């Protein structure tokens, strides 16, 4: 099943289990969640976060029950041990959520990250308390320790009487417990003191990796990369490393250095070079100890209506102490401006995955980002995957051409709602340890695609995770609108693709039914990325799932004369509101 049908069946079964009248008379479908989203399976799809739904006030929908934005890692020495991380809103604002499994993902338990406060040295006090956190990632070292990267920040007077808008990154280590517990307090990677509340500086979008190659000369070194959005309008990529198992970190090292590929500086300062607008960095390592950092850059020069951007990569061969000048991985085309095509209710200044046709329910923010890896059987081979809205499958004869930028600076295209455009997951390869890439000098329309199944050539795929197996098989998982009516309703599935021959891909549908567009947070947010982990023969795609029906206190109940009762409700972009849970599926690699 896919699309609206599966959602309504979920609603009917939930209502029946509560003893209420079903929304629609349909046969009972097994393996659906019961009341409050407690049941944990949908066929082979397993719920990772262990909580039942909190009954959150409708005007705060998402703030007390959602989980989204996923990362996952498998112990390289014991494939039965897996750790997953995500944004967790159960306490009312985002925090760094962790779940772990000791039986190859068959069952999961939640962990609690001790990130309520840290040592306040950088703000001149004993403690700094944090209102929110997220942008998580996890990785294992060769000794069986797990590391969690967690962004922390305060929101300022926009939502509280506290003006503090400080931000920071911390790494927490789970020492021998496989993600069940962590050190307190977390170890500082980078901090910014904004207790005065200027709000003009943000440490953002960090990701972590650990060199867990046993023969690497930098084995067990911990790396974190991020973007610093400074008061002068710049956005540079930085890296810091730890050589003592995450106990301390180096001073920040510039990654996004000066480059001939950056010809448009937007009239803002260039204190660290002309590549002054970057985002979405990801670090990864090779068996030889080389550290790679891939990221999006927006300083490329375009003419006329063209609106492409570029993916750059820098390398470090000295354990993160310095980096080569960035090389070009490829150009790509960003997803279209949400306001322009989806109208009222969308998130201004954001791109999104616009469904085709008349509906306007897919309004959550989304963007294309790069994910790279090194083939463990050939350390010369580096592959970077990323999304591109214009690609070899785009039907430009039906109208799918770049059309410059909207007033908010986000891409616009001719033919977005007509069906000629589609987002594909493409890739660019290097055979010389990242010195040159196959996509560095060609049009994105010529790039090979991970998403080469028949129906994928006219539908959208986005938010990919990618990794190499120990045998050198390239695996990618991603959100996919190629099933049923997904592409016209805004529903999504998860698909897994794998290439054994470096040419074609085999595909396997992961989700047991399609997921409706998210409604939490007004329908505009379900995270910004998704992850996958692999063993020799099994992949573990991890995603934010929207098939659980959201529940609220029934109007007129919870009074002295009427006990509280649970009801469903509507949302701005859906007749039945839904929740966001973290799901995984152990999938045999096709």
Image: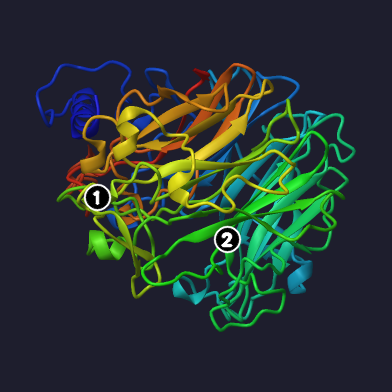
Query: Is residue 333 something that shows in the picture?
Result: yes
Name which residue lies at 50% across and 61% down: 309
Judge left or right: residue 102 versus residue 424.
right
Number of numbered discs visible in the structure rendering: 2
Mark 1 vs 2: CB contact within 8 A: no
Question: Toward which corner of the image does residue 13 lie, by quadrant?
Answer: top left
Residue 2 image position (x, y, % from top left): 25, 29
Can you identify the residue that label 1 sits on?
Answer: 397
Count neighbours of disc 1 (C-alpha within 10 A) and say few if under 14, some if 14 to 19, many if 20 or more. Answer: few
Residue 197 image position (x, y, % from top left): 58, 79
Name which residue lies at 39% across and 53% down: 525
Query: Is residue 99 something that shows in the picture?
Result: no
Question: Toward which corner of the image does residue 65 lie, by quadrant?
Answer: top left
Can you identify the residue that label 2 sits on?
Answer: 279
Say which element carries label 2: strand
Say which element carries label 1: helix
Position of 35 relative to 524 (above/below): above
Q: Nearer the viewer, residue 252 or 579?
A: 252
Q: Nearer the viewer, residue 161 or 470?
A: 470
Quarter the N terminus occupies: top left
Position of 582 relative to 422 (above/below): above
Residue 425's disc number: none
Residue 129 image position (x, y, % from top left): 64, 62
Name which residue lies at 38% across and 72% down: 304
Q: Given this view, does label 1 or label 2 mark the residue nearer the observer?
A: 1
Count neighbours of disc 2 (C-alpha within 10 A) and say few if under 14, some if 14 to 19, many if 20 or more. Answer: many
Q: Earlier in the sequence, mark 1 or mark 2?
A: 2
Residue 298 image position (x, y, % from top left): 54, 66
- Which residue appears farthest toward the left when viewing the image? 25
Q: Nearer the viewer, residue 423 or 242?
A: 423
Q: CA distance from mark 1 to mark 2?
A: 32 Å
């Amino acid at each position: 099943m896919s699309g609206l049908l599966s959602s309504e069946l979920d609603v009917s079964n939930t209502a029946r289990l509560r003893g209420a009248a079903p929304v629609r008379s349909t046969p009972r479908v097994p393996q659906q969640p019961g009341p409050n989203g407690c049941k944990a399976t949908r066929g082979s799809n397993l719920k990772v976060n262990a909580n039942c739904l909190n009954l959150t006030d409708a005007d705060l929908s998402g703030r007390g029950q959602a989980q989204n934005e996923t990362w996952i890692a498998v112990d390289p020495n014991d494939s039965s041990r897996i750790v997953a991380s995500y944004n967790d809103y159960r306490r009312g604002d985002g925090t760094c959520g962790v779940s772990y499994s000791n039986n190859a993902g068959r069952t999961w338990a939640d962990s609690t990250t001790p990130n309520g406060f840290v040592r306040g040295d950088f703000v001149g006090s004993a403690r700094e308390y944090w209102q929110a956190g997220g942008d998580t990632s996890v990785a294992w070292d060769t000794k069986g320790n797990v590391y969690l990267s967690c962004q922390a920040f305060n929101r300022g007077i926009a939502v509280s009487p506290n003006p503090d808008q400080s931000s920071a990154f911390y790494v927490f280590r789970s020492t021998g417990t496989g993600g069940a517990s962590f050190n307190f307090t977390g170890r500082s990677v980078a901090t910014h003191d904004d207790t005065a509340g200027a709000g003009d500086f943000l440490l953002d979008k960090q990701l972590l990796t650990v060199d867990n190659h046993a023969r690497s000369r930098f084995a067990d070194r911990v790396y974190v990369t991020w973007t610093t959005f400074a008061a002068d309008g710049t956005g540079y990529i930085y890296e810091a490393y730890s050589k003592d198992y995450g106990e301390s970190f180096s001073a920040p090292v510039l990654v996004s250095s000066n480059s001939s590929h950056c010809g448009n500086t937007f009239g803002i300062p260039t204190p660290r070079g002309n590549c002054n607008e970057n985002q979405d960095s990801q670090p990864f390592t090779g068996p030889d100890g080389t550290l790679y950092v891939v990221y999006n850059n927006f300083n490329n020069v375009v003419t006329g209506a063209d609106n492409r951007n570029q993916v750059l990569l820098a390398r470090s061969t000295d354990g993160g102490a310095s980096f080569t000048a960035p090389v070009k991985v490829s150009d790509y085309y960003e997803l279209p401006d949400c306001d322009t095509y989806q109208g009222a209710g969308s998130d201004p200044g954001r791109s999104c995955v616009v469904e085709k046709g008349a509906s306007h329910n897919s309004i959550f923010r989304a963007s294309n980002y790069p994910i790279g890896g090194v083939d463990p059987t050939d350390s010369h081979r580096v592959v970077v995957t990323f999304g591109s809205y214009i690609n070899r499958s785009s039907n430009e004869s039906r109208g799918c051409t770049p059309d410059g930028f909207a007033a908010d600076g986000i891409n616009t295209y001719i033919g977005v709602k007509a069906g000629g455009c589609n987002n594909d997951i493409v890739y660019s390869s290097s055979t010389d340890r990242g010195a040159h890439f196959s996509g560095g000098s060609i049009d994105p329309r010529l790039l090979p695609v991970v998403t080469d199944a028949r129906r994928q050539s006219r539908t959208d795929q986005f938010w990919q995770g990618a990794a190499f197996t120990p045998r050198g098989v390239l695996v990618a998982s991603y959100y996919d609108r190629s099933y049923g009516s997904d592409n016209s309703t805004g529903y999504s599935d998860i698909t897994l693709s794998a290439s054994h021959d470096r040419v074609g891909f085999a595909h396997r549908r992961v989700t047991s039914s399609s997921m409706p567009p998210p409604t939490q947070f007004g329908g505009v947010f379900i995270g910004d990325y998704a992850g996958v982990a692999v063993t020799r023969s099994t992949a573990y795609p991890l995603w934010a799932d929207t098939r659980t029906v959201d529940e609220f206190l029934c109007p007129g109940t919870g009074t002295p004369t009427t006990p509280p009762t649970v009801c469903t409700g509507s949302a701005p972009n859906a007749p039945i509101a839904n929740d966001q849970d973290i799901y995984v599926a152990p999938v045999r690699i096709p």
